[in-house]
């Protein structure tokens, strides 16, 4: 409250954050759709090939309020997102809307993400994927197993979908968590950062959103490699939950996540 009793509004300065690795066919359309919603855009090029770099150079030159960060070599989605989240926070943004470069996510839902975040600025707004028939069955069933582990790791059902890469982060808390301990470099980033922010006391809001797998789309998910990483991540997070269980349960009993 201010001295005269008026409510002081929280500053809300969001941007969009896109990690990219060789998605030259879809990135321009994604960025233009985000700019149509008025969002500044931060792109992190995770060591893409020369044709993708050329597309990005043209896009940045032709589009206002688009910032390009380049990683010298491919380091993985998690590293790219950490670099972008830190840069967005350092640039003065308060929130970052993570969205994929490959056209999977429905940009029409941007206003819903922003409205949910503006109503509860301390919360993480997690997309809850609604799939059509384009989703590979093995990927769909694997996601349900991760959902169960996340419910165990948070001792709650608060995070409905920890694997959806369409998500809006409160940057102050996220930047602090990145600084606290290293995060996974690749596809397991999305789940681990969601669980660790929950442990930190960041509320999770779940927003249903349509997700497609575009025909002839480029996926960087590698079944054996990434499933092994996800298994190791869940082992690590379950052990972390056991250490934190008294504090998590105490916070829940006190109603801190309401």
Image: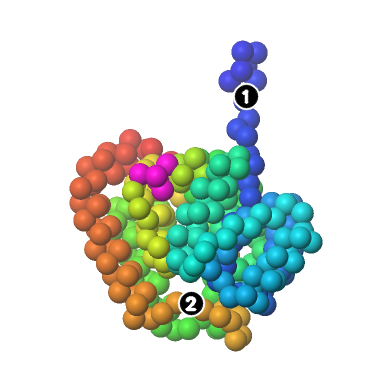
Q: Residue at x 77, y 54 (%)?
A: 64
Q: Quadrant of residue 201?
A: top left
Would residue 251 be found to the left or right of residue 91 on screen?
Answer: left
SS for tag 1? loop
The C terminus lies in quadrant: top left
The alpha-carbon separation of the residues under discs 1 and 2 comes to 46 Å
- Could you tell me residue 88's position as x and y percent? 57, 47
Q: Return the residue at label 2.
A: 220
Numbered circle sitting on residue 7? 1
* Helix, strand or loop for the magenta stretch, by majority: helix
**Which contiguous range is marked in magenta?**
176-180
Of the numbered discs 1 and 2, the one sitting upstream in the chain is: 1
Out of 179 and 157, give the one closest to the viewer.
Answer: 179
Q: Residue at x 44, y 84 (%)?
A: 137
SS for tag 2? loop
- Check contact, mark 1 vs mark 2: CB within 8 A: no
- Could you tell me residue 11's position as x and y percent? 62, 34
Seen in the picture, residue 21 relative to 172 is either above or below; the reply is: below
């Amino acid at each position: 409250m201010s001295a005269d009793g008026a409510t002081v509004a929280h500053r809300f300065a969001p941007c969009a954050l896109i990690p990219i690795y060789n998605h030259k066919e879809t990135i321009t359309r994604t960025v233009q759709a985000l700019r149509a919603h008025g969002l500044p855009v931060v792109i992190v090029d995770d060591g893409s090939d020369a044709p993708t770099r050329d597309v990005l150079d043209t896009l940045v030159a032709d589009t206002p309020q688009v910032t390009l960060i380049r990683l010298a070599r491919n380091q993985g989605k998690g590293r790219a997102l950490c670099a972008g989240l830190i840069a967005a926070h350092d640039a003065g943004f308060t929130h970052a809307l993570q969205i994929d470069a490959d056209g999977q996510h429905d940009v029409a839902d941007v206003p819903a993400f922003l409205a949910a975040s503006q109503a509860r600025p301390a919360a993480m707004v997690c997309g809850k994927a609604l799939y059509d028939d384009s989703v590979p069955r093995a990927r769909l069933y694997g996601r349900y197993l991760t959902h169960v582990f996340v419910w165990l790791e948070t001792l709650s059902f608060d995070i409905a979908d920890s694997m959806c890469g369409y998500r809006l982060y409160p940057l102050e808390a996220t930047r602090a968590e990145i600084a606290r301990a290293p995060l996974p470099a690749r596809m397991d980033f999305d789940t681990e950062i969601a669980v660790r922010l929950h442990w930190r006391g960041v509320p999770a809001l779940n927003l249903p959103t349509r997700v497609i797998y575009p025909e002839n789309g480029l996926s960087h998910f590698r079944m054996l490699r990434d499933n092994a990483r996800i298994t190791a991540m869940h082992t690590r997070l379950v052990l972390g939950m056991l250490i934190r269980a008294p504090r998590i349960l105490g916070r829940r009993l006190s109603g801190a996540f309401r």
